[in-house]
Image: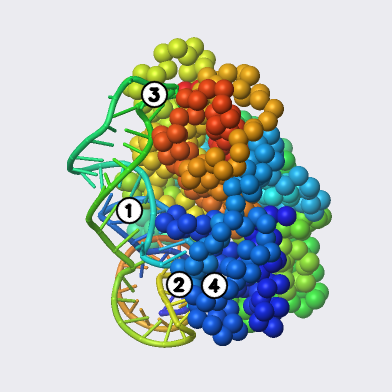
RNA sequence: GGCCCCGUAGUUCAAUGGAUAGAACGGAAGUUUCCUAAACUUUAAAUACAGGUUCGAUUCCUGUCGGGGCUACCA
């Protein structure tokens, strides 16, 4: 049983017996004592003042005395205003270290809840390469999956690829018209870049046609856009695709194949992966059954023109189209279908969709429509909505060409890591392949940490130069701290590190060591909180705090200067555990840590 | 217009309704016989505004002002 649970348990007993009332449930919580005060846990006693019929100070004093009598783990307490600060005794912290110091799984729940949790993330379109926005999405999705696994969930990571529709037909048309049979091999470009280029080509050629039409025939721009030859050809191509035209499908498969190969490279560099990939080309028809079901149940209505709608005004939303008048499905219809499909595939207890906040409304509608249909999984849908990523130069706009390409960004992070490390001149003894892997670890660590340390729902500003700073709240700083501890442990020598036991007496534990122990103790709670809020930022900020505390400890107390003593053994064991927790927390963010740097 | 999200030091980010609102970068001043100075110490600097709820509000509620998003028979 954990310390705070033991305390709270005793506390509720005391309150019931002494004040004759059950304590209000929401008041029975402990918080970590703030650094400026002495103590480990703090109880706010204001909620009990009324039933105690004493002043806040007297109430705290009374509760403190009672707890001291009951809990052998409690060393002392002090009272400041209505705050009761409790200090666990050195023995408790010492035992904690003894128990956990050799546990590689510290902080992770080992028993697994068999009900799967499904996490959808990435969700790319096949007509554009991945960009900075996708990077945030991928990192968030992967990290959330890792965190959920750490709190004992069985996680299924899925991707939903939007591989069909007018946009990919535009790329196909441009390639057929202007491509001269170009392939990624002949052009020396990743496949997703090649296809993306032809999408851009389509748009620029279309723009030229529109300008001409609008100029010579004085059409409105909207009309010109709709009637331009390229646009009607693209529509025609989509019709052929939907009819299953063999030639069209062959081009489509070839080009999508290029794209997937390109995506896979990017995913690998980002370190993300999926258990299952859904393709919209295979699922886009599946929502129609649900529409029929809704019509039968009378929760949807068919209008005179044949289109099908749902009225959500009773939920404070508008009417929403579910099926076009020509009987084809729209975005939301597909999402209804895929939700059902996933439910059938996995029967998940929770379905998490990592999708940008511009789709908040869409997911609100999706959930309510499924609820109207009486689907059991409607309430399991959770939209993990995240904010936009902006750059120091301003917002990303694809039209203005200010989109940051994911591969280019990854390359830049690598280069910056190399430049910075070379400037500092500490890597001469590494071989070429070691260097390459180190720059990769550093560059990606910088990128991932910088993005994940921010609360997902907030818009954020990504500054590449700042992210790779080796100081401050950055990935490289944490990686550096880890590498330094590993270096210390190597110096300590095998026999000391392997020391079976630590025999230091509890009263030799000093304040900085206690601080460290207390922070380590919080690690499991941090994961738990991050898991329930689906927020990796908790883990990121925790690991930074741990590193800072270790640096302070390290600065003040040499780890090795009392060789072969109890103190030295103790500090080495403590360092070892700090290193392990840093590594574990970085693992939850998908960040690698270097053994030396 | 309607709906949703966000406003915290110069900047980027923290703070389950709790104590004197924390860090980091940048600014100012210091610390090298030392296991990594890629460190540490000191210092100045902020809750957009106005009400309300309560023992207590950055946090919850209302309004105002700013920023962003959504409001397609696109996805």
Task: Give the x, y percent position of residue A553.
Answer: 45, 38
| Residue A421, numbered circle | 3
Chain identifier of the residue bearing label 2 in the image:
A
Element type at marker 4? Answer: helix
Same chain check for tags 4 and 1: yes
Mark 3 or mark 4: whose residue is earlier in sequence: 4
**Spatial separation of the CA atoms under disc 4 and disc 1:** 82 Å
Frontmost of labels 3 and 4 is 4
**Spatial separation of the CA atoms under disc 3 and disc 4:** 53 Å
Relative vertical location of residue A419 with respect to residue A508 in this rendering, above or below: above
Q: Give me the residue at 38% from left, 40% from top.
A: A472
| Residue A81, numbered circle | 2
Task: Give the x, y percent position of residue A404.
Answer: 42, 40
Q: Give me the residue at 52% from left, 17% from top.
A: A434
Viewer-proximal residue, A20 or A44? A20
The residue that disc 1 covers is A215
Element type at marker 2? Answer: loop
Chain identifier of the residue bearing label 4 in the image:
A
Same chain check for tags 3 and 4: yes
Chain identifier of the residue bearing label 1 in the image:
A
The residue that disc 4 covers is A60
Element type at marker 1? Answer: helix
Q: Is residue A54 visible?
A: yes
């Amino acid at each position: 049983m954990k310390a705070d649970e033991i305390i709270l348990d005793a506390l509720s007993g005391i309150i019931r017996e002494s004040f004759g009332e059950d304590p209000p449930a929401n008041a029975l919580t402990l918080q970590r004592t703030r650094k400026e005060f002495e103590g480990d846990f703090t109880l706010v006693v204001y909620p009990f003042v009324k039933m105690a019929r004493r002043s806040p100070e007297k109430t705290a004093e009374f509760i403190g005395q009672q707890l001291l009598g009951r809990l052998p783990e409690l060393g002392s307490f002090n009272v400041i205003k209505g705050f009761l600060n409790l200090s666990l005794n050195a023995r408790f912290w010492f035992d904690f270290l003894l128990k956990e110091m050799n546990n590689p799984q510290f902080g992770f729940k080992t028993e697994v809840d068999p009900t799967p949790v499904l996490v959808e993330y990435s969700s790319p379109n096949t007509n554009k390469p991945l960009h900075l926005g996708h990077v945030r999405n991928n990192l968030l999705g992967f990290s959330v999956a890792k965190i959920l696994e750490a709190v004992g969930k069985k996680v299924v990571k899925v991707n939903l690829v939007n591989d069909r529709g007018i946009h990919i037909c535009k790329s196909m048309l441009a390639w057929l018209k202007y491509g001269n049979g170009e392939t990624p091999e002949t052009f020396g470009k990743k496949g997703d870049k090649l296809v993306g280029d032809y999408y851009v080509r389509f748009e620029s050629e279309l723009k030229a046609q529109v300008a001409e039409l609008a100029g010579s025939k004085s059409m409105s721009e909207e009309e010109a856009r709709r009637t331009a030859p390229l646009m009607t050809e693209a529509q025609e191509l989509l019709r052929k695709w939907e009819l299953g035209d063999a030639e069209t499908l062959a081009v489509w498969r070839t080009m999508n194949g290029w794209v997937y190969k390109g995506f896979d490279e990017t995913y690998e560099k980002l370190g993300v992966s999926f258990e299952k990939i859904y393709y919209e080309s295979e699922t886009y028809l599946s929502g129609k059954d649900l529409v029929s079901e809704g019509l039968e149940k009378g929760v949807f209505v068919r209008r005179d023109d044949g289109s099908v709608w749902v009225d959500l005004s009773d939920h404070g939303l508008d009417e929403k189209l579910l099926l076009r008048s020509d009987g084809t499905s729209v975005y939301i219809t597909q999402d209804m279908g895929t939700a059902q499909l996933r439910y059938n595939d996995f029967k998940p207890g929770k379905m998490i969709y990592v999708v940008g906040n511009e789709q908040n409304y869409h997911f609100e509608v999706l959930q309510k429509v499924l609820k109207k249909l009486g689907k059991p999984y409607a309430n399991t849908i959770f939209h993990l909505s995240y904010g936009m990523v902006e750059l120091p130069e301003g917002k990303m706009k694809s039209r203005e060409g200010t989109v940051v390409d994911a591969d280019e960004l990854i390359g830049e992070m690598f280069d910056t890591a190399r430049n910075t490390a070379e400037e500092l001149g500490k890597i001469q003894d590494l071989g070429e392949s070691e260097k390459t892997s180190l720059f990769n670890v550093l560059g990606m660590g910088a990128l991932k940490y910088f993005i994940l340390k921010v609360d997902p729902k907030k818009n954020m500003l990504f500054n590449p130069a700042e992210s790779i700073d080796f100081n401050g709240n950055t990935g490289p700083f944490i990686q550096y701290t880890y590498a330094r501890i590993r270096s210390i442990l190597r110096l300590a020598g095998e026999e000391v590190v392997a020391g079976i036991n630590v025999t230091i007496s509890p009263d030799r534990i000093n304040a900085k060591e206690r601080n460290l122990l207390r922070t380590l103790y919080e690690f499991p709670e941090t994961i738990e909180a991050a898991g329930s809020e689906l927020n990796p930022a908790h883990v990121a900020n925790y690991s930074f705090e741990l590193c800072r505390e270790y640096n302070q400890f390290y600065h003040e107390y040499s780890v090795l200067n009392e060789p072969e003593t109890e103190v030295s053994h103790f500090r080495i064991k403590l360092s070892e555990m700090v290193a392990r927790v840093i590594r574990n927390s970085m693992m939850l963010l998908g960040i690698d840590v270097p053994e030396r740097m």
